[in-house]
Image (cartoon, rainbow, N blue to C red):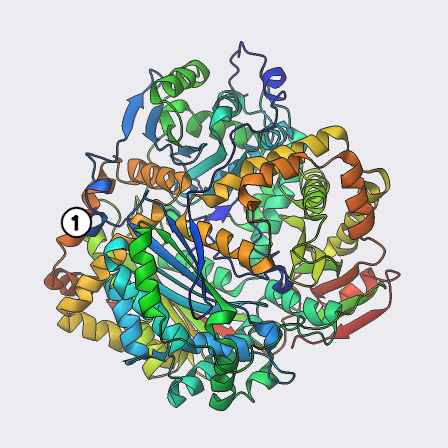
């Protein structure tokens, strides 16, 4: 469910004692769901007034710029059009491994120097990898823009992939896998959900990769991967914040312009057959409470229905007034939480549910309640007020995603890559506002079909199993 | 092989020469006033987006939980949005969602925080809801029962997450019976005793205008906001004496001890090293912050460099000072596969010991100062972040010019200051060690580090 990330952002380290004040945690790692921008957000957020320029260098590198002089700082995103969907069995996890290696030395920036130089200039960097993309960013003061251009063009031109760094960094990645998957219940379920739901799609393996593959990825595979996928013609740069567009473009041309283009990468093969029956899986693991995930097959970006699915997701699980919370948590009081997850992806994907049951409650009870909620929604559709509420929530979420330079850049990169044009960001509004109750009914009926779902149950087990011997 | 191209500029030479970040930081203009009823109010207009953020802080929190009633502040905060004024739980949830807004209430150690974020056009709805849930919660009996049950379920769930277990067990391990020690959600046995009467009494005692502060930041007209606030909170009156907020002396753990929290199934061990630290408004705040940046914040800190980058022992390691109003902690958190548990602890202690013994290099000091001054403004872009900053200054009694002088004060930290901070406020031999792991394995590997105790997660 969660994309892998270069650094935990204090994830596991925020001690109970550490937060005298409860600052809201920023969900850094996930590309915001497509949302919309009309009425109350007003003309301030229309394509006409929210000025974005798009330039393409001769080597195919796309550059998006948006000036905002509110704070003397900039965010520089680099979106590489490669994620775990571009991998193959045997090298699963290589995209995310690369996300780590991009900070580990290039021709003119030896290992450790990237971060040293960046932090010496007051900058911060992080990155994430998901099924469809690998994205990097730096936040830095406006007068240090040249620093990130030089650092990032150097690694795009000539990543070193030194054996010593490869060896040490894979251990870091394995610890990340142990943290987020092998010792995390939601992580275990999510991995099994995708592995069970897809039999041919590259979405079937986890973004972080199988442990066995992490043990065997070779330097040669990394070198070939870099040449293919880290070419300028496979990348989108996004610059937002306090800078002068013309001057910045000149600097980008100077630093990135000479990096040679490569042959475009082959399109990933997706031979996923139609699912013709419910699939079930179990994870046996010591746990206090039962939880389960359900994934229904859902379309990718090519379908107009993705906007309707976003609206359905909001109706089902956004906030305490949502249908799932009202039914499972509030009325029946059988669940601690009931959430949905749907993100527009390049390929057909899953519309996911995650339910944590209260002590003593079974997954069967939870699934029956979930089925009843979905059945009612598919039969009757949402009420007028409920539909309006969902649209308002999606619209507000979009406005909020633009609070920072970083957020603006993340949205632009996401739409340019996944929708193929950043302008889709502005059109999405109309797509949401156009969704009718009948669309919700139609898409719910089409999507929430038991024959096209996968269910993964956590089966709590009293005693830990003996450690499997290799 | 990677492609090679020649970069004509001498990259390293140019880049390494960066000086202090130049641009001085100015907060948008704001006002601080005290309403007749004692409520402190900040108003700051920012026009970048059509949003308004409200943040209201009450000077209470889990530190005010009576002994045996741990979790009371948290349950009270949870219940604020479950019935208030004329609305029931469902209507509150429905009304805020209908305008695409958020309304949240939660307890921290020393604060109960109510936040509301709405689009500009929904200012009135947001203010009314924020006011009602703060001033006039109704605590319906069935909601109290439900939220209490959910808290008990959540406590059970948290025992499934090794990092949460580590964080929650660290409090009592380090702070003993201090009211700072327990997790805000409380313990299973204390939450089980909470009643509606407890909640009503807690709210009545602590939620008073002269014990609270409010910030409104966003696309607003200051005069109109002030008039609206005066009107909205006119009926909120303080009754009786103000509750005391002192929590007495906190035990000073001065000896090495080792605690193994039993979690036999894990393949990766969560590790916490901790000792006592300093309160938030400490005269050496800036030297401490700079020194800690060198030790364990950012990607180039000594701990990240040695434990993650060089040795590949972990995915994440950091050190930090948790600063409360009148006390604080210093701690290091990380995790590693079970097989490298002892090695990770030994190497971590070595990194701390080396820095304390020899101090940082001039380059490290300069880098930490640039990093801190460069990052600080980035955290102040969003209206909710600005609201938090304003109220932090108010709550901890910081310099009203804290934001404007931040860079100067960081830059004023000398090598002597930094070494003094390391010597005075950091620790190594006194660090208590907590791990969440398989006890048989961990006991063997931790032998010799100090007296070992094993316990089950609470």
Horizontal placement of B380 versus B46: left or right? Answer: right
Q: Please provide percent x and percent y for residue B317.
A: 66, 49
The N terminus of chain B appears in which quarter of the rendering?
top right
Please tell me in which quadrant of the rendered image residue A341 appears: bottom left
In the image, is residue A52 above or below residue A401? above
Q: Please provide percent x and percent y for residue A160.
A: 58, 24
Q: Residue furthest right?
A: B448
Q: Please provide percent x and percent y for residue A302.
A: 21, 44
Residue indicated by mark 1? A431
Q: Is residue A256 visible?
A: yes
Q: Closest to the observer: A98 or A200? A: A98
Q: Secondary structure at mark 1?
A: helix
Q: Closest to the observer: B417 or A229? A: B417
Horizontal placement of B442 versus B217: left or right? Answer: right
Q: Chain of mark 1?
A: A
For the point 56% across and 89% down, the residue is B193
In the image, is residue A130 above or below residue B40? above
Please tell me in which quadrant of the rendered image residue B78 appears: bottom left
Q: How many marks?
A: 1
């Amino acid at each position: 469910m969660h994309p892998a990330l270069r650094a935990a952002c204090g994830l596991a380290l925020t001690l109970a004692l550490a937060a005298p004040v409860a600052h809201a945690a920023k969900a850094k790692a996930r590309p915001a769901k497509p949302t919309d921008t009309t009425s109350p957000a007003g003309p301030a957020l229309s394509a006409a007034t929210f000025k974005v320029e798009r330039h393409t260098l001769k080597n195919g590198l796309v550059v998006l710029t948006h000036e905002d002089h509110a704070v003397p700082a900039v965010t520089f995103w680099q979106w590489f059009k490669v994620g775990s969907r571009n991998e193959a069995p045997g090298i699963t996890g290589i995209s995310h491994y690369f996300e780590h290696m991009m900070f580990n030395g290039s021709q003119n920036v030896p290992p450790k120097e990237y971060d040293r130089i960046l932090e010496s200039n007051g900058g911060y960097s992080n990155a994430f990898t998901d099924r469809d993309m690998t994205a990097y960013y730096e936040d830095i003061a406006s007068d240090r823009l040249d620093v990130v251009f030089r650092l990032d063009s150097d690694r795009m031109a000539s990543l070193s992939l030194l054996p010593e760094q490869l060896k040490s960094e894979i251990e870091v990645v394995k610890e990340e896998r142990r943290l987020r998957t092998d010792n995390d219940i939601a992580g275990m379920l999510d991995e099994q959900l995708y592995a069970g739901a897809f039999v041919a799609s590259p979405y079937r393996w986890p973004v972080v990769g199988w442990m066995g593959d992490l043990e065997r990825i070779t330097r040669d595979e990394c070198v070939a991967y870099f040449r293919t996928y880290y070419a300028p013609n496979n990348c989108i740069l996004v610059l937002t914040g306090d800078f002068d567009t013309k001057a910045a473009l000149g600097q980008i041309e100077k630093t990135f312009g000479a990096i040679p283009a490569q042959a475009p990468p082959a399109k990933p093969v997706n031979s996923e057959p139609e699912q013709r029956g419910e699939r079930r899986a179990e994870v046996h693991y010591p746990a206090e409470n039962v939880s389960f995930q359900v994934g229904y097959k859902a379309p990718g970006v090519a379908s107009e229905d993705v906007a309707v699915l976003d609206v359905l997701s909001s109706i089902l699980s956004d906030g305490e007034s949502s249908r799932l919370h009202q039914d499972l948590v509030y009325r029946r009081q059988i669940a601690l939480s009931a959430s949905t997850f749907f993100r527009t992806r390049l390929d057909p994907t899953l519309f996911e549910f995650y339910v944590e049951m209260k002590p003593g409650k079974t997954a069967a009870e939870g699934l029956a309640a979930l089925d009843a909620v979905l059945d009612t929604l598919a039969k009757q559709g949402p009420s007028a007020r409920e539909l309006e509420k969902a649209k308002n929530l999606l619209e507000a979420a979009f406005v909020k995603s633009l609070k920072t330079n970083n957020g603006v850049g993340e949205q632009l990169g996401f739409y340019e890559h996944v929708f193929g044009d950043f302008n889709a960001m502005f059109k999405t509004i109309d797509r949401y506002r156009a969704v009718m109750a009948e669309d919700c009914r139609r898409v719910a009926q089409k999507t929430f079909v038991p024959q096209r779902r996968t269910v993964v149950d956590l089966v709590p087990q009293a005693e830990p199993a003996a450690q499997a011997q290799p | 092989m990677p492609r090679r191209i020649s970069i004509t500029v001498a990259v390293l030479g140019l880049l390494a020469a960066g000086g202090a970040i130049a641009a001085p930081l100015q907060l948008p203009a704001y006002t601080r006033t005290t309403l007749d009823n004692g409520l402190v109010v900040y108003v700051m207009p920012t026009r970048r987006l059509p949003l308004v953020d409200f943040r209201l802080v009450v000077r209470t929190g889990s530190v005010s939980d009576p002994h045996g009633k741990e979790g009371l502040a948290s349950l009270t905060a949870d219940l604020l949005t479950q019935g208030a004024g004329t609305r029931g739980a469902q209507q509150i949830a429905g009304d805020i969602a209908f305008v695409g807004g958020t309304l949240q209430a939660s307890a921290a150690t020393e604060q109960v925080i109510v936040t509301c974020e709405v689009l500009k056009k929904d200012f009135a709805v947001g203010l009314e809801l924020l006011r009602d849930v703060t001033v006039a919660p109704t605590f319906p009996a069935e909601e109290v029962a439900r939220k209490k049950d959910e808290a008990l379920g959540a406590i059970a769930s948290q025992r499934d997450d090794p990092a949460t277990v580590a964080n929650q067990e660290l409090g009592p391990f380090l702070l003993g019976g201090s009211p700072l020690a327990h997790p805000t959600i409380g313990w299973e046995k204390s939450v089980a005793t909470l009643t509606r009467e407890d909640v009503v009494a807690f709210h009545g005692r602590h939620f008073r205008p002269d014990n609270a502060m409010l910030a409104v930041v966003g696309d607003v007209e200051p005069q109109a906001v002030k008039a609206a606030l005066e009107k909205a909170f006119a009926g909120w009156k303080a009754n009786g004496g103000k509750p005391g907020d002192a929590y007495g002396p906190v035990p000073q753990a001065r000896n090495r001890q080792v605690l193994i929290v039993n979690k036999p199934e894990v393949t990766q061990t969560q590790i916490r090293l901790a000792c006592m630290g300093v309160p938030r408004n400490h005269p050496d705040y800036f030297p401490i912050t700079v020194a800690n940046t060198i030790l364990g914040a950012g990607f180039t800190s000594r701990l990240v460099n040695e434990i993650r980058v060089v040795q590949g022992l972990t995915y994440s390691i950091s050190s930090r000072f948790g600063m409360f109003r009148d006390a604080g902690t210093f701690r290091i958190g990380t995790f590693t596969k079970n097989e490298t548990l002892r090695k990770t602890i030994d190497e971590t202690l070595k990194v701390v010991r080396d820095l304390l013994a020899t101090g940082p290099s001039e380059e490290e000091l300069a880098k930490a100062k640039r990093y801190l001054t460069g990052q600080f403004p980035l955290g102040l872009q969003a209206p909710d972040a600005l609201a938090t900053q304003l109220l932090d200054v108010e709550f901890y009694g910081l310099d009203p010019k804290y934001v404007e002088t931040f860079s100067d004060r960081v830059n004023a930290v000398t090598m002597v200051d930094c070494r003094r901070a390391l010597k005075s406020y950091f620790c190594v031999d006194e660090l208590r060690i907590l791990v969440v792991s398989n006890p048989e394995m961990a006991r063997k590997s931790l032998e010799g580090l100090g007296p070992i105790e094993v316990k089950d997660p609470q």
